[in-house]
Each structure stands twice: as structure tokens, then as C-alpha cells.
Amino acid sequence: METKKVFLVIADISGYTNFVRQEKIGKLHAEKIVCELLESVIDATDNTLTYYEHAGDAVTFYAESEGNKERAKIVFEQVKQMFKAFNEKQRLLAHELETGNEEVSHAVEQLKLKTIIHHGEVVFTKIKNIIKVAGQDVIIAHRLLKNSVSARQYILTTEEFQSVAGCLGKYDPQKILEYYDGIGKVKAVVYNSIHGVFQNKVAKRNFAKRLLITTQIEQNRLKKSFWRFVENYGRVKRLGWNF
């Protein structure tokens, strides 16, 4: 075991839970799509970031820091590349699915990427030759996935990361303060308006077509609700109950 100062990065897909629950897609197909999107995020990184964990809709990376300002800036640039790779893969998947199943294609377009960047001390352990990264700062990074930010795609950096990185460009990040039981206050800033990073490149259909797809999805939902009501009503009548 050993402890090191590192930059921690978590890339998480917003909308994952609703996406995998959609009957029109199927769990296996949905997970395959999510895995392809996460693989594009992993492939967008170079040797600066080390990928070490995948859990459902998120992948985690670390980079040894040594308190290096330039290395922090490289990490931030790598995260920006993750968004570009995600958007491009999303666009390709949505296009491939568009001719066969427009509802699924539309659902893929609704997925977004959010990332957490933190700086702190971690413990490296090895279990069955698998390297694990643990410690309080790992917990903080993961807890930050649940925050008060209303946007669905963003880069959230903690005060600890910002103190090493310094100015990251002519952006206008939003300052936030989160509170977590057992941790306390966590100061951070949120970037959600970096040109060319959060601009989703999925080819946009015309408004009428999008409205039609949304209407079809809602019609299918209402049909299921109606037939569920009819089925339940029939059961009640067979039992001789009165309303």
C-alpha cells in the first residue's frame, strides 16, 4: 500500500437510469449503447490519465499530480476531449439508429455527460493483482456526483483542484457550495458553457419530426396506461366489486 497526491476524474452519464428502463430499447441493447459511449470517453484520454474503474454509468480515472500546475491544466484539457468524443459517438449512434428505430435514436440524444475533477490524497491498494484507489478524497469525488447543479452536462472542479490548476481559461464558471454528511462543506466551481465542448453535435431533426416522435412516445405511454386500467377494471368486475 502507498499514498499519493492525485487528480481524480469521474465521467458519468446523465439520464442513464431512465434510458436503460425504456422497454423500446431493451436492457441489453441499452447497456451496449452506454458501454460504447463510455469506451469513447476512455479512448479520448492519453497517458496522462489512468482509467481504473467502471461502475454502471460512470468511469473513473486518476493522474499523479505532484502539485504540478501544468499537469492540472493537461487533465482539464483531457476532460474537455472526453466531451467531444462523447458527442461524436452519440451523434454516430443516433444516426445509425434513426432509420431503424427513431424512438431509440431520440432517447440516445437525451443522454449527457458530466464530470468531476478533484485533487487529493489517495491510498493505492492491490487485491488479486487489481489496483484499487481508496480514501476520503475518493469518497468526496463520488459524493459530488449528487449535487445541486441543475444542468445535465458540465465539468465540476473542486476548490482543491482549482488551487493547483489556477486560471483555466476565459470561462465564467459558477461557484457552488455543497454539504455532505460525514464530510462537511465542499467548495467547487461548475463549467457548463465552454464553446465547442458542451455544444452537442447530434444532427438535429426538424421541429415537426421531433414533435412527432415525442407525440408517438406519449401516445404509447397512454395506451399502456389505458389497457392497464381496462385489465384492472375487468378484475374488479369479476370479483363483483362496485365503485
Image (cartoon, grey):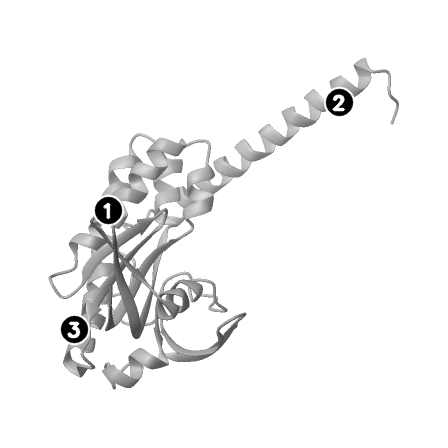
Query: In the displayed structure, does residue 216 sit left or right of residue 96?
Result: right
Q: Label for residue 233?
A: 2
> How far apart in space, not on screen, are marks 3 and 2 (Cα)?
62 Å
Q: Nearer the viewer, mark 3 or mark 1?
A: 1
> How far apart in space, not on screen, are marks 1 and 2 (Cα)?
56 Å
Q: Which residue is mark 1?
A: 128
Percent x, y for residue 243?
87, 27
Asked if labels 2 and 1 touch by Cβ distance under 8 angstroms, the answer is: no
- Residues packed near mark 2 inside 10 Å, few (<14), some (14 to 19) or many (20 plus): few
Q: Nearer the viewer, mark 1 or mark 2?
A: 1
Q: Label for residue 74?
A: 3
Query: Is residue 109 in sight in this rendering?
Result: yes
- Whether 45 is drawn above or below 179: the answer is above
Three-letter code, disc 1 = Lys
Three-letter code, disc 2 = Tyr
Residue under the image location 18 percent in, 83 percent down? 69
N-term mark: 3 or 2: 3
